[in-house]
Image (spheres, rainbow, N blue to C red):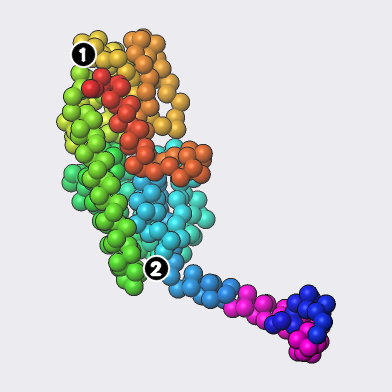
Amino acid sequence: MYCLSSKFNDIGGIQGNRLRQCFPPRITVRIFVVLTMSLLLLCLLVEQADAKETKVKVIASIFPAFDFARVVGGSRVELRQLLPPGVEAHGFAPTPRDIIQINQADLFFYTGAIMEPRMAKLLRSLDGEVRVVDLSQGLLPTEKKPHDHHGIDPHVWLDPIKAQAMVEMIVSSFIQIDPEHTNEYRNRADTYLLQLADLDRKIRTGLANCQQHIIISGGHFAFGHFIKRYHLQAVSAYPGFSADGKPSPKGITSLLKTMESTGATAVFHEELLTPKVARIIVEESGAKLLLLHAAHNVSRQDMAAGVSYIAIMEENLQRLRVGLLCQ
Ligand SMILES: [Zn+2]
């Protein structure tokens, strides 16, 4: 090894001469290069083999499923959100390329036929080995009309207790697919379940003492499960929980009347859509406009910044505390 050091070429005396005799310099360099290349190649092959063996390929349809799977899966999964960041969730139609990718995945998480009717239809045509998991399973009232978004609120993730049930479904799915890493998935899920319980506690405490108990919504209202959990009420200019519903002049008038009778001072609007109706109500009533983020999806910027479901819900809590005049 000392023969590789040029500084020894300048060393005089017995030791220096003996070292220079080890190998001629050119051969030494060649040996060094060959050894380094072999080592690098070996590392690369081991890494690739390891990745092939251990990564579980997962596709999640919309943000809550993606975020929960990201936390529970950690570095064991290769995860992708199907809905591109910044795109409104309800109008999204998967492309044939998306379907090919779902077919090639190990797991596909989505939020059920009521939330994602187009996806549910396309899933019937899957012919791959992919395991499809409906994360709304057991969390919705019994469906009478499977594709009706109007009567049943499909936004189960907005209730942190139901979000915990979704996380349980995700951890069970990972363990079934990749039992070797059961403890890893379980530990991450348990830590996250505690964080969700903490979120629930914060919301309970934060909304315990408010002057207002009615959320005035100027957008498509997604917080049905949330208001039920925290004993609130809501009025919306839109009928039901559907994103396709159109607000009626009658609906807006009735909403303005409610605001007047309750002394409401804030109107909430949804994410990723221009709040046209909410702005009309704000202009008419003089109330302030606040975002109530339903976490269907996040903007490109937020996705790149790694925004989380918990962070979104904590911000919602702060805005609700402002809008509902809480102490
Ligand atoms: Zn929605």
For this view, does 290 lie left or right of residue 201? right
Say which quadrant the C terminus sits in.
top left
- Position of residue 310 relative to residue 15, above or below, is above
Q: Residue at x 44, y 66 (%)?
A: 55
**Residue 244 seen anywhere in this rendered image of the structure:** no
**Residue 316 seen anywhere in this rendered image of the structure:** yes
Residue 142 screen position, x and y as percent: 18, 46
Q: Badge 1, how many Cα within 10 Å: few under 14, some, many 20+?
A: few
Q: Which residue is mark 1?
A: 262
Residue 228 screen position, x and y as percent: 18, 34
Q: Secondary structure at mark 1?
A: helix
Magenta-highlighted residues: 14-42
Q: Residue at x 52, y 55 (%)?
A: 97
For this view, does 239 lie left or right of residue 123? left
Considering only order in the chain, which callout, 2 or 1, is on the residue closer to the N terminus? 2
Say which quadrant the N terminus sits in.
bottom right
